[in-house]
Amino acid sequence: MDFLDNLVIPATTQHLNLLKVILVLSMLIFLPFFGMLLGGTAFSVIFNAYGRKIKNKLFIRLAKDIIDKLAINRFVGVGLGVIPMLSITFCYAQLLFQEEVISVSLLFVATLFMAISVTFIYSYQNTFQIERLIETFKNISGLDKHELDTRIPEDIADYEFDLMNTNSNSGLYGFILLLLTCIFFSGGISIALFTDKYQDFQNIAQMFLSSATLFNFLFIIVLSITVTGSAILFFFFSWQGGLHDMDPVYANFSKKIAGNIAFTGAAILPVFLFLSFISIPNVALSGSVFVYTGLAFVSILLLCNFLYAVIKNSEMKYISAAFYVLILSFGFIIMKNESAFGIASQKNFEEINLKAEELEKRKKSKTINTAGVNGEEIFTRICSACHKFDVKLVGPPYDQTVPAYNGDVKKLAAYILNPVKKSPDYPPMPNPGLKPKEADAVAQYLIEKISGKK
């Protein structure tokens, strides 16, 4: 993206390390929430459609509670979804500075899909609230079903019909957009690892042909299924005492479905974690990648044990432990991915750091205030008696000494103000008695002369 290229600048080593930390934190915020939003929307839409088809209010209520608890509200969707996604995109834009690869473009498109999906999902969520108000109105009307069908105003009936369509369509559109977000997000982070094959990934079609993109996409889907089931159990039965208006029938119904979702996802998650691992290119492998992958396997197995205790033995005290272990698994998975990206991009990071140092030198040179002082005149009047640019005189030639300051005007000016003996081949340089501004001016003149700018 050309406009992103204009926003980023080469980062120093310290800034690169800070960007890596920000990237990990943004991933830790984004991935668990995105998983809940993706899985929660999918299961809510499925249960809602199925419940209305068979006229089962338990499924409809479960669909409503899932989208309420897992999506929370629009502000949370922006704060935990869109903003972290923007942060991830910007971090990759900085870390892939001037690299010819489509990763940043793919992540930017994923961010756009994420932002649009939030609008549809929270529209879907709101239709449940409006539907509930209509049902409340019907309940307090005192009319039986036949009277409701004949005496409810036509415009209210039409509105209820339109509401059902909006409910169904908004949820479906939101889910499709989240799937697209997942595809482009998977492509962006996967392709970024292939630093030795960036030339092979120059358009979206090549992304879809990448096995690494496919494996990571499937891995995130299964991860979303796992976190959705675990989150339903956590928010329905543990967080702040769980839902307070659940009767035993609905509680058992919800626990059974959520437990099966969570355990099924967790049981097959190691398979897709392995596929994701083997898709990592050799250039990105390191000891830390193996360690974090191993820790992720262990934490997922521990998660399966906790979920099994919840499902088979009704050990509800393990619900919180299962959810927290799942979040820990997210941490290991993210560290695995970012360690691989760091190893693969090491050479690029070194080049970025060199460019950042060059830019810093130019900035320092440009910020020297030498107004009203002529550096060339000072050189001619004071310095030229002992120094020339390419010939040894009393002092060494400048083309041998000035390059050692790497364009740092302030550093050379500091030496001119307080010279010390550096080479046994030459006498110590006397203090020329210049003012700081004069030293800055002559130092800038010498550096520009040596670099060919004058």
Image: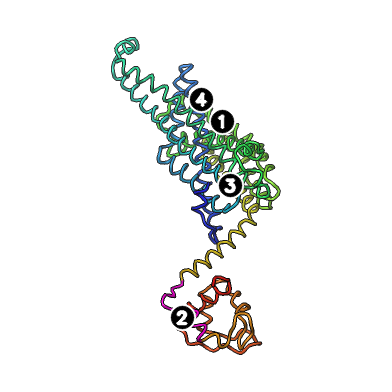
Q: Secondary structure at mark 3?
A: helix
- Above/below status of 232 relative to 278: above
Tell which circle, 3 or 1, labels the residue nearer the N-terminal end: 1
Q: Residues within 10 Å of mark 4 (few under 14, many from 20)?
A: some
- Picture quadrant where residue 214 is located: top right
Amino acid at the residue labelled 3:
Ile
Amino acid at the residue labelled 2:
Glu
Residue labelled with disc 4: 46
Left or right: 304 as drawn, with respect to 228: right
| C-alpha separation, residue under disc 1 versus residue under disc 4 | 13 Å
Q: Residues within 10 Å of mark 1 (few under 14, many from 20)?
A: some
Amino acid at the residue labelled 4:
Ile
Pair 2/3: label in front = 2
Residues at badges 1 and 2 in contact (C-beta under 8 Å)? Answer: no
What span is in magenta?
368-381
Decide whether residue 28 is among the magenta residues: no
Tell which circle, 2 or 3, labels the residue nearer the N-terminal end: 3
Viewer-closest of 192 and 32: 192
Tell which circle, 4 or 2, labels the residue nearer the N-terminal end: 4
Residue labelled with disc 3: 334
Residue labelled with disc 1: 261
| C-alpha separation, residue under disc 2 versus residue under disc 3 | 54 Å
| C-alpha separation, residue under disc 3 versus residue under disc 1 | 23 Å
Q: Position of residue 89 (x, y in %)?
A: 52, 47
Decide whether residue 375 is among the magenta residues: yes
Pair 4/2: label in front = 2
